[in-house]
């Protein structure tokens, strides 16, 4: 057991030495893998952030029910009772036109402009918190509410969030395709690197076979090399993403201050980081394995 | 220990390298394999190490039919053999020590034990002081001895040598034959192919001769471990 472990460590050391034996070449390989991985992973991260922003902004969906300006108080009362009985509605909030105007004055800093108005242009309104959250059910409810008497307009406040959600789905598919393609590229890079290694070490492989090396023994350093190179590429990708994020956040701060917002891009979570590293390691190993399976049998002692 | 019976080997393209070859080599025996170049000496050695497979007949090594061994079993067969190659097959990217270390790495020896064994093997062939040298810096004779050190470091029971004195001058050849004899004395089985007549003059060693792929009757395969011959080898052992 101990002996086996020591042997594996020795093989790993050999593999790492091979990566760094040509320092620049090894570094460039790792850089290419890092860049290839950082593209889909970085896009994924951006999508995650936008996704977070959407849920933060949209919260629970609301329907705003704007009433006709000539709606009487008793009509409003009747409407309120009607709404309360609707099983699709969780809770109803009434916002009177006066209250709405006051709110507008306070929140936008347009007090001067509003103060100059002859009359209150705002209608009375109900803010409705529906029970269902699916886009389609909400749409049905909105149409239903729009038909009620004295209702001028029914507006689904989170409609944009659903549209964005659909857009995000599109983006995620894009990331998936990109990730698939670039993963293939990573496998191809490793495949080729290992092929060259096998060629340069063909005499060592031949001699090893002649003096009793098992195929596993010969394969091992190449597999370790592939996995190690993949892992280092993954680390490179992580660094690229993290550094880019810092730079973007720096600029974003200036931007969001103008909008009085606190939005910053969050870095990769621990889970995502580890997934990235494991995935790139696996891809490197896979590329090496394919290459070894393909090329090693061609070197037979003669 | 090594036994050929009616072995034929034909290479792709039709060249018949061995024709109906039969002989036996007992454990602990030292045998010369003689013949001009192209007589099939190298092919015969390759069949023993399962580098090539016979077209017909059987090749037994330690009672194992190596002609039909599965690919997976080959490494374990070869670990029992020490092979000294005509072209040395040394690795030029590492020093003498690491060249000799390779078989032990393959078998998974730990560092201390293998260092000890490597030095012992290098000492045996008189290269202990050159352990840091790269093969490129060694003379032809030294390279040959390094190859021997690599073949014996794993203490195999059978040593196969393909033209070990091929392109060495007489003094070096003497030296190398002396090394082989010392292995024979400690009980190893040796099969040494050579066309070097000065080496073959040592009549105490049994000689089998190949000519155009056929065993010559002089080295009678009918009496493989004949009493006279094996008796002749005994004094060398004592």
Image (spheres, rainbow, N blue to C red):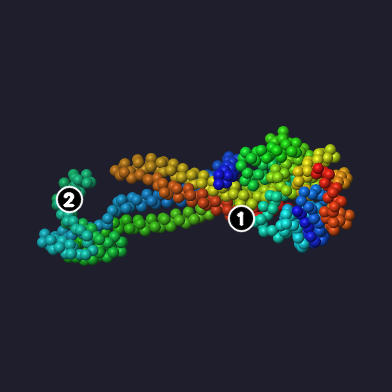
Q: What residue is shown with label 1?
A: A293
The residue lying at 55 percent from left, 42 percent from top is A27
Sequence order check, earlier mark of 2 and 1: 2
Q: Which mark is residue A126?
A: none
Where is residue B114 shown, x and y percent of the image? 65, 41
Q: CA distance from mark 2 to mark 1?
A: 75 Å
Q: Chain of mark 2?
A: A
Instruction: Pick whichever, B124 or A106, lies toward us.
Output: B124
For this orientation, the residue located farthest to the top is B129
- The residue depicted at 70 percent of the width and 38 percent of the height is B120
At mark 1, the secondary structure is helix
Label 2: how many Cα within 10 Å (few below 14, some 14–19, many 20+): some
Pick whichever, A94 or A151, lies toward us.
Answer: A94
To which quarter of the image does residue A290 belong? bottom right
Q: Report the residue marked by disc 2.
A: A101
Asked if the residue under mark 1 is in contact with the one under mark 2, i.e. CB atoms within 8 Å, the reply is no
Question: Is residue A104 rendered to the left or right of residue B125?
Answer: left
- Chain designation of label 1: A
Residue found at the far left of this picture: A74
> Residue B197 location in percent, x, y?
87, 46
Specify few, some or many for label 1: CA neighbours under 10 Å numbering under 14, 14-19, or 20 or more: few
Q: Is A241 displayed left or right of B52 in the figure?
A: left
Classify the position of the C terminus of chain B by image quarter.
top right
Residue beneath the point at 72% across and 59% down: B65
């Amino acid at each position: 057991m101990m002996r086996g472990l020591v042997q594996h460590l020795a093989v790993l050391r050999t593999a790492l030495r091979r990566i760094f034996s040509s320092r620049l070449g090894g570094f460039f390989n790792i850089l290419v893998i890092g860049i290839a991985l950082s593209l889909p992973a970085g896009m994924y991260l951006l999508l995650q952030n936008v996704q977070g922003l959407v849920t933060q902004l949209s919260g629970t969906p609301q329907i705003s029910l704007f009433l006709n300006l000539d709606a009487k108080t008793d009509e409003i009362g009747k409407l309120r009772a009607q709404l309360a009985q609707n099983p699709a509605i969780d809770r109803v909030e009434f916002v009177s036109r006066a209250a709405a105007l006051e709110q507008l004055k306070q929140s936008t800093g347009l007090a001067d402009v509003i103060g100059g108005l002859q009359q209150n242009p705002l209608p009375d309104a109900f803010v409705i918190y529906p029970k269902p959250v699916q886009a389609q059910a909400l749409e049905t409810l909105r149409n239903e509410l729009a038909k009620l008497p004295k209702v001028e307009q029914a507006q689904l406040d989170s409609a944009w969030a659903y549209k964005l959600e659909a857009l995000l789905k599109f983006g995620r598919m894009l990331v998936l395709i990109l990730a698939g393609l670039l993963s293939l590229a990573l496998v191809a890079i490793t495949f080729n690197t290992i092929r060259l290694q096998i060629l340069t070490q063909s005499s060592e492989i031949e001699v090893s076979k002649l003096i009793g090396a098992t195929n596993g023994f010969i394969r091992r350093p190449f597999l370790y090399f592939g996995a190690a190179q993949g892992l280092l590429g993954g680390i490179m990708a992580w660094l690229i993403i993290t550094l880019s994020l810092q730079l973007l956040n720096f600029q974003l701060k200036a931007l969001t201050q103008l909008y009085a917002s606190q939005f910053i891009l969050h870095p990769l979570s621990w889970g995502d980081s580890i997934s990235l590293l494991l995935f790139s390691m696996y891809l490197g190993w896979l590329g090496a394995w394919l290459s070894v399976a393909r090329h090693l049998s061609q070197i037979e002692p003669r | 220990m090594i036994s050929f019976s009616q072995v034929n080997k034909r290479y792709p393209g039709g060249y018949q390298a061995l024709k109906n070859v039969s002989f036996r080599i007992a454990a602990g025996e030292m045998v010369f394999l003689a013949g001009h170049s192209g007589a099939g000496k190298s092919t015969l050695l390759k069949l023993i190490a399962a580098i090539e497979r016979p077209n017909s007949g059987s090749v037994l090594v330690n009672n194992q039919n190596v002609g039909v061994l599965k690919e997976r079993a080959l490494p374990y067969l070869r670990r029992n053999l020490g092979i000294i190659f005509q072209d040395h097959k040394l690795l030029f990217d590492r020093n003498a020590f690491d060249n000799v270390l390779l078989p032990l790495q393959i078998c998974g020896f730990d560092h201390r034990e293998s260092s000890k064994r490597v030095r012992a093997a290098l000492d045996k062939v008189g290269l202990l002081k050159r352990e840091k040298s790269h093969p490129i810096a060694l003379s032809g004779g030294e390279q040959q001895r390094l190859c021997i050190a690599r073949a014996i470091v794993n203490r195999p029971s059978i040593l196969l040598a393909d033209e070990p004195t091929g392109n060495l001058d007489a003094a070096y050849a003497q030296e190398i034959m002396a090394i082989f004899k010392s292995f024979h004395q400690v009980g190893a089985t040796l099969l040494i192919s050579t066309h070097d007549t000065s080496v073959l003059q040592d009549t105490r060693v049994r000689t089998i001769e190949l000519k155009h792929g056929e065993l010559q009757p002089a080295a009678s395969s009918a009496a493989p471990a004949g009493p006279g011959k094996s008796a002749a080898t005994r004094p060398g052992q004592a």
